[in-house]
Amino acid sequence: MPEIKNKKFSVNADGLFKQNIVLMSGLVTAPIIVAATNAERAVMLIVSFFLISYTGILLCRFIPRRIVYTVRILLYAVVAAAMYIPTMILLERLFHEAVSEVSLYVGLMVVNSFLLAKTETRFYLKPYPEMTLDAFIYVLGYALVTLVVGVLREILAYGTVYSFHLCEPIMPAAKSPFFGFILVGILAAFCRGIVGRRTSVRKERGV
């Protein structure tokens, strides 16, 4: 994958595809599999993930590293929990009653492994400006997968996109968690296949 560079720092863009946290790492798949059954729900998950996880990463960076690891992780969860309240208020203003359909899974984001683990193994090892862009690319990768899954399932199950009628329902079962699991698995296999192929080509070319 290309690297985003300037005079001050460089950020690898692998988080968008090669190290996608849904398709390659499987860190935050449950809400997508169960709740991303249409485009609107997908957008709600994206907004929630951005506000809780990305904002949490930016804020938790200021927690001193000298604090013991176990306590730091607990503090990360506390910060994320604090972000849950304004996130739900914003969702209720933007989506009204529909927010109840994903509220449970928004709550689960407070302790998602992306925030609690990736921070320690990658983001907090980098300078703050570089970290902010790197983490944003990972969140963008999550957003792309979530939106693709939501739109595909809505078209198949309801024949609509954001309630705009396109066709007759093709596969009503597409809204089920089982289908969501299968769809995410297919996308993951496709993603891994492309990454593996690119890696092989680069090795053959000696890159």
Image (tube, helix red, strand yellow):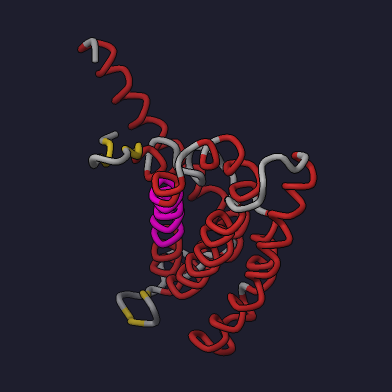
* Residue 176 falls in image quadrant: bottom right
Q: Quadrant of the C terminus?
A: top left
Name the residue at 69% across, 67% down: 107
* Number of numbered labels in the structure image: 0
Q: Camera-side residue: 156 or 129? A: 129
Q: Which residues are magenta?
A: 133-148
Above/below status of 136 relative to 188: below
Q: Quadrant of the N terminus?
A: top left
User: Residue 137: within the magenta?
Assistant: yes
Describe residue 178's horizontal placement relative to residue 77 as left or right. left
* Residue nearest the observer in this picture, 88 or 155: 88
- State the predominant SS element of the stretch in magenta: helix
Q: Residue at x 32, y 21 (%)?
A: 199
Q: Is residue 97 above or below residue 142?
A: below
Instruction: Write down the quadrant of residue 81 in the picture.
Output: bottom right
Residue at (64% x, 60% y) in the render: 109
Of 166 and 59, which appears nearest the observer? 59
171 relative position to 63: left or right: left
Q: Was residue 166 drawn as part of the magenta stretch in this picture?
A: no
**Residue 41, percent from left and from top:** 51, 72
Residue found farthest to the left: 205
Looking at the picture, how far across and down is residue 9, in whole percent? Answer: 32, 39
Quarter of the figure with residue 117: top right
Q: Residue 5, image x and y in percent?
A: 25, 40
Determine whether, in the image, residue 71 is placed left or right of residue 47: right
Q: Position of residue 15 (x, y in %)?
A: 41, 42
125 above or below 205?
A: below
For the point 39% across and 65% down, which residue is it? 151
